Image (spheres, rainbow, N blue to C red):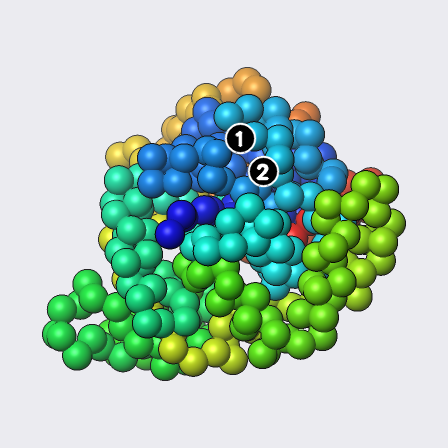
Amino acid sequence: MAVYAVVMAGGRGERFWPLSEEARTKPFVPLLGPRTLLQQTVERLDPLVPPERVLISIGETHHRLAREQLPEIPEENFIVEPLARDTSACLGYSALHLERRDPDAVMIAIPADHYVGDAAAYRATLERGIRSLEGVTAVVFGVRPVRPESGYGYVQARRPASGREHDPWPVVRFVEKPDRATAARYLESGDYFWNSGIFVWRNRTLLALFERHMPATYRGLCELRPLLARAGAERERRSVFAGLERLSVDFGILERSDGLVLVPVEFPWDDIGNWAALERALPADAFGNVARGAHVAVNSTGCVVYTDAGTVATFGVSDLVVVQANGKVLVTTKERAAELKRVVSALGPEHAPKEQRGETE
């Protein structure tokens, strides 16, 4: 079995304004270091999945930018989505492309914009998931919660009969984002995991799951199959793609499927959902301040600072988010950082990231 990775590089990036804007959304910005999140995602896959077996699912708007950032990826490995239709359509369309290349392939589906703190442990965990595919429908990678997080989806799983917690856990159910009290109960129970959004399945199995659980989308995929190699069929592909259901693969496929197992991850992970999350991914100074770029802190504690030009100084403040990027400045509290979409909306349509052609949400 040849193993391929499909890296989903969509999204609008409103929670990382002003660094992330319409032309350069979250996967394409150097949020955690000199390399972008997309570049870091591809780099940590090698050598488990070398560049020639990494497929990038991308929208037309960011196709050129992705090619510039990933010169090691062959041009034919960029899968350009005709429209935004969430992750089910993204991965179904990618499965058609992978089917043409290798009908017996194993697909790892990976978001392009997460933080992973240990690349070697990441690859070892993926390998464990690939080995766990025998006799199961798909593998979900779960993160052991370390706080009562209400912003993540959860997966409930049953402890392995072997008693070894590193072995696969049979999946019981998926749970949408809970309230904080419920999340606290999940944390205490020991059998709930954060849903990392990383999955492994055989490509044939994924297409069969579409046929069973999303038949309308599967019919659309069958219409798209002969159009992939047809020159001048862009308008037809776009028309068919527009009719696909707009659902996440979690809700459309995984929550409706049997025979799933969960493999606990053995690496630091965070989905870096807003500016405040940087304090979980970057080192802090003696006063709890986290900074990317030049930052001078005087009587300041617990601040998150990002600057792409010049120096930011914080004086006598605590728990602020201060961002200077693309000639714009943001100042908010860590507590309100998750509500940044309201600011982008208030700034007007010229600042708001528009729904991109072919951007996976």
Q: Quickly name the residue at label 2.
A: 77
Q: Position of residue 108 (x, y in %)?
A: 44, 53
C-alpha gap between disc 1 and disc 2: 7 Å
Q: Secondary structure at mark 1?
A: loop
Amino acid type, mark 2: Asn
User: Could you tell whether 55 is left or right of 49 in the image?
Assistant: right
Label placed on residue 340: none
Label 1 close to label 2 by CB (< 8 Å) = yes
Badge 2 element:
helix
**Camera-nearest residue between 51 and 268:** 51
Residue 188's place in the image compared with 60, above or below, is below
- Tell which of 78 and 11 is nearer to you: 78
| 12 shown above or below 191 | above
Is residue 29 rendered to the left or right of residue 120?
A: right
Q: Residue at x 46, y 47 (%)?
A: 5
Residue at figure coordinates x 46%, y 53% from the top left: 105
Residue 183: where, in percent of width, then height? 38, 74
The residue to which callout 1 is attached is: 73
